[in-house]
């Protein structure tokens, strides 16, 4: 069923932008991880109406999340009694735009339902729901599934030697599908060697790569002239998938989000180790 806030139901349904309930909501997050030939989705449902919770506890209702992918014609409904669960898909099941539709559904006929949070316009009840009726829903979420979107942000960069640069200078070239980080010959050799250490990678992530990501975000924020390049497509879809608006936030805030808080890696791998020296 498609989300339509204008659709009328003969019974109260907890949903966004509709006042069937005077308070409460269902909020569902779906965190996609793409690894090799498998896609895992960590789903978390936050339901703030205790009366609907009780129906789930009694086995009369369930959380249902429907995954629909137009590119592969794949559709799957995951049913759970628990608010947090993991769904696993084969890599070929999902590709491109995936729509996540969250619900709470009656799995058995429900009679005698009442809630103090139901809007008085529906009367005091009791209310009845047939098996398959919707009790609650959240807005659908559109997620883009592409292997490169879920790789570390450093994957959009390639290290390139530039003989015209001074030893400690570097440049960013945004004119290719993958961003070129141009460095001198000696520094390129040192960086390639340093990347074998996790602590060194954390330092590079918070220095060279963080600065480069900031430059990419600044350029994307200014115009869409690079949107036909792979690096721009990946970064924009990373922003979309984590729900952050590039135009509404400073670049350093967006960079931290799409790089998954790089300071945490520096703290764990460098600062903690130094504290024991």
Image (spheres, grey):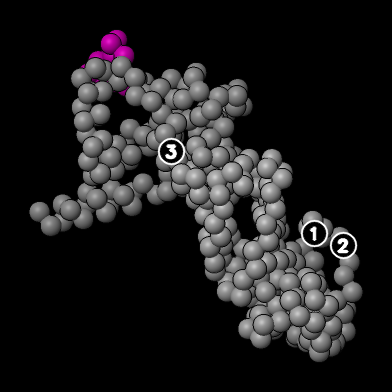
Q: Is residue 110 left or right of residue 189?
A: right
Q: Please tell me which of labels 3 and 1 falls first in the chain.
A: 1
Residue linked to disc 1: 1
How busy is the neighbourhood of tag 2: few (under 14 within 10 Å), some, or many (20 plus)?
Answer: few
Q: CA distance from mark 1 to mark 2?
A: 11 Å
Residue linked to disc 3: 153
Location of the N terminus by quadrant is bottom right
Q: Please tell me which of labels 1 and 2 falls first in the chain.
A: 1
Q: Which residues are magenta?
A: 162-170
In this view, the residue in front, 215 or 76, is 76
Residue linked to disc 2: 7
Residue shown at 88% from the left, 84% from the top: 123
Secondary structure at badge 2 equals loop
Give percent across and percent down for residue 84: 54, 69
Image quarter of residue 11: bottom right
Magenta-colored stretch includes residue 139: no
């Amino acid at each position: 069923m498609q989300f339509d806030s204008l659709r009328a139901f003969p019974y109260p349904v907890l949903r966004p932008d509709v006042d069937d309930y005077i308070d409460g909501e269902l909020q569902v997050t779906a965190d996609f991880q793409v690894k090799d030939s498998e896609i895992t989705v960590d789903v978390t449902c936050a339901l703030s109406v205790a009366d609907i919770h009780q129906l789930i506890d009694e086995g009369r209702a369930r959380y249902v999340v429907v995954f629909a992918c137009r590119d592969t014609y794949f559709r799957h409904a995951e049913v759970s009694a628990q608010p947090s669960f993991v769904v696993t898909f084969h890599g070929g099941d999902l590709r491109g735009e995936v729509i996540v539709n969250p619900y709470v559904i009656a799995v058995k006929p429900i009679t005698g339902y009442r809630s103090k949070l139901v809007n008085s316009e529906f009367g005091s009840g009791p209310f009845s729901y047939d098996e398959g009726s919707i009790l609650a829903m959240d807005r659908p979420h559109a997620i883009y599934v592409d292997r490169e979107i879920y790789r570390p942000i450093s994957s959009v960069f390639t290290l390139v030697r530039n003989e015209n640069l001074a030893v400690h200078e570097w440049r960013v070239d945004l004119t290719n599908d993958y961003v070129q980080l141009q460095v001198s010959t000696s520094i390129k050799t040192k960086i390639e060697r340093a990347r074998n250490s996790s602590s060194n990678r954390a330092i590079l992530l918070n220095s060279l790569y963080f600065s480069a990501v900031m430059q990419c975000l600044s350029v994307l924020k200014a115009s869409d002239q690079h949107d036909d390049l792979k690096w721009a497509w990946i970064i924009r879809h990373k922003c979309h998938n984590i729900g952050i608006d590039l135009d509404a936030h400073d670049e350093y805030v967006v960079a931290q989000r799409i790089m998954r808080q790089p300071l945490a890696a520096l703290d764990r791998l460098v600062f903690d180790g130094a504290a024991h020296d």
